[in-house]
Each structure stands twice: as structure tokens, then as C-alpha cells.
Image (spheres, grey):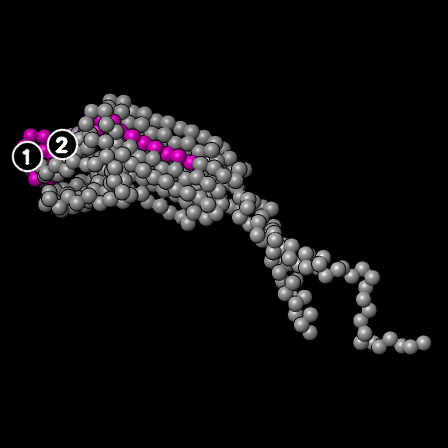
């Protein structure tokens, strides 16, 4: 009987056809292609803030607020609202710095994030109607006077939203200023109803140092892949050693009118994460098989 050479390998009766082998080798890569097909929105927050005046003088807090503030935090769908009517307060020591008045301040926040669904939405909004703010002497004209006035039924408002799922989160913010007049040192700036995102108002005509005015300010963080957050300020006035004159001295801080925010985070589904693991193992096996066949 003829001997079988030792170096001759016997084919197994259970050897799979080439097409089946290719399918098994490629299956992990097919699974990898599904990474972005499913996801879970794990958390979401939203908030609204009608007004906050954060001012300091001689290192002491002389501001007022916040007013009409609301927020929600998910998972678990939630909604919240806040309203302040007929606001009238004074600022500073012995009410010496100025006054704030508003007919209505509203804030609203909603999130439908449930920790299970692949797509969700968070929305925050805020508005102020009939708003007036004044900083400076009430009795005599001073070079540092600052005032904001919105006419009648006009609103200063903003809204922020984040929607979508893992890999495709979208953020959208917008602001409206209504009929607003900003006065600095007796110079009036009549504001438009809307501005492009992150507009810095030119107030050089007032010849006053230490003041910057941000309109439709939109602060975005995240990549849109697994997280996105947006804060929108209809109006934010920053004061840095702003001299009110008339013996009132200097103040620093911020005046925020109509602030909203929204945020979401998302991850692939656990099954998708397992697909990544299986895919990685499969690719390693395929690479080793390729090396063996090469030899």
C-alpha cells in the first residue's frame, strides 16, 4: 500500500465552501457598518431665564435676579415653566444705582429624553415684555448713564433647541429684540428686531469704556456626534469697571436678558457596541488567516 507523504494535508469532509468562508470573514465588517444605525439619547437638559443682573461695586453684589428661571434634566421626559408679573426693583446700596421694571417675564423648558429612544429633543426659551432698566443717577445727568427700554407689547426673547440622535445631533438658536432702545451716555442705539448670531454692537459713538453689548449670542459646545449644547442670549451686556459718574463710582458684571439653553448626549446602543467588539475580533482573525494563506 502506498504511503501518504507526511507533508500532504488531508482535506476535512466538513470544509466550508469558499463563499461561506468569505461571508463569515466579512460578517464582522458588515456589523461594523451598523455602528451609526442605532443609538440611545442618554441625557438632556433645557433651561430658560428671563432676566439676571449680576453687578458688583466695591466687590459687593449690587445686582438683582435671577427672575423667571426654569430648567429640566432628563432622562424621564419633563417640562417646566416660570413667570414673573409686574416686576419692579431697585439696585445698589440704598437703591442708588438704578431700577429694573418688566410687565412680564416668561421661561419655558421641555425635554422628551427617556433614556431609551434613539432620537429626542430638548428646548429652552425665555422672553421679557415691557422691559426697562436704568443705571446711573436719578437726579442729574451723568456721563455713565445706561438704559434699556422695550416699547409697549414688544418682547425680548430667545430659544435654544438640540434634536437628533447619536452621530447627527443638531443645535438651533434664535433671538428677537422687538422695539428696543439702548442708551449709553445719552446716545441712543435703536436695535433691529433680529441679528446674526454673535453680533457685537458697535457702541463707540457713546465714547464710553468698559462696556460691550452682545446680541443673539450663541455659545455652542460639543461635536454633534455624541454631545451638543447651546446657550442663547438675546442680549448680554458686559461691564468692566464701567464708570457711572456723579459720585456713583464704577460697576462690573453682566446684564442678561432672555437666556435659553439646551443640551443632549447620546451613545450607540449596547448591541452596537458589541458589534464593534465582534468586528474587531473578526478583523484580527481575518488578518491572521491572510498571513497563513500567504505562507
Query: Is 167 left, or right, of 200 in this rendering?
Result: right
**166 over 124 or under it: above or below:** below
Which SS class for mark 2? loop
Image coordinates for residue 133, horizontal then vertical, percent: 18, 31
The magenta segment is 122-145
Image mark for residue 233: none
Which residue corresponds to mark 2?
96
- Which residue corresponds to the image point at 12% horizontal and 36% vertical from the top-left? 188
- Which residue corresponds to the image point at 49% horizontal and 33% vertical from the top-left? 76
In space, the residues marked 2 and 1 are separated at their CA atoms by 14 Å
Image mark for residue 141: 1
Which SS class for mark 1? loop
Q: Nearer the viewer, residue 222 or 146?
A: 222
Q: Nearer the viewer, mark 2 or mark 1?
A: 1
Residue 79 found in image quarter = top left
Query: Is 101 left, or right, of 36 in this rendering?
Result: left
Amino acid at each position: 500500500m502506498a504511503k501518504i507523504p507526511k507533508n500532504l494535508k488531508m482535506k476535512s469532509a466538513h470544509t466550508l465552501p469558499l463563499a461561506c468562508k468569505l461571508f463569515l470573514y466579512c460578517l464582522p465588517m458588515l456589523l461594523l457598518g451598523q455602528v451609526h444605525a442605532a443609538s440611545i439619547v442618554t441625557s438632556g437638559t433645557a433651561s430658560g431665564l428671563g432676566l439676571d443682573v449680576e453687578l458688583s461695586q466695591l466687590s459687593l453684589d449690587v445686582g438683582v435676579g435671577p427672575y423667571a428661571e426654569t430648567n429640566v434634566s432628563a432622562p424621564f421626559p419633563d417640562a417646566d415653566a416660570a413667570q414673573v408679573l409686574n416686576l419692579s426693583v431697585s439696585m445698589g446700596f440704598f437703591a442708588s444705582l438704578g431700577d429694573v421694571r418688566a410687565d412680564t417675564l416668561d421661561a419655558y423648558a421641555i425635554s422628551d429624553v427617556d433614556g431609551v429612544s434613539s432620537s429626542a429633543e430638548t428646548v429652552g426659551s425665555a422672553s421679557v415684555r415691557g422691559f426697562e432698566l436704568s443705571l446711573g443717577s436719578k437726579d442729574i445727568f451723568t456721563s455713565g448713564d445706561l438704559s434699556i427700554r422695550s416699547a409697549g407689547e414688544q418682547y425680548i426673547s430667545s430659544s435654544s433647541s438640540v434634536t437628533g440622535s447619536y452621530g447627527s445631533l443638531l443645535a438651533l438658536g434664535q433671538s428677537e429684540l422687538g422695539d428696543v432702545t439702548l442708551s449709553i451716555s445719552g446716545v441712543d442705539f435703536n436695535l433691529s428686531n433680529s441679528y446674526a448670531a454673535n453680533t457685537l454692537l458697535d457702541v463707540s459713538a457713546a465714547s464710553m469704556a468698559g462696556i460691550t453689548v452682545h446680541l443673539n449670542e450663541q455659545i455652542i459646545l460639543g461635536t454633534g456626534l455624541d454631545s451638543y449644547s447651546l446657550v442663547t442670549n438675546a442680549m448680554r451686556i458686559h461691564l468692566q469697571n464701567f464708570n457711572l459718574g456723579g459720585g456713583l463710582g464704577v460697576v462690573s458684571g453682566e446684564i442678561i436678558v432672555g437666556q435659553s439653553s439646551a443640551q443632549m448626549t447620546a451613545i450607540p446602543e449596547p448591541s452596537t457596541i458589541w458589534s464593534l467588539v465582534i468586528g474587531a475580533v473578526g478583523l484580527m482573525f481575518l488578518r491572521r488567516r491572510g498571513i497563513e494563506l500567504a505562507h
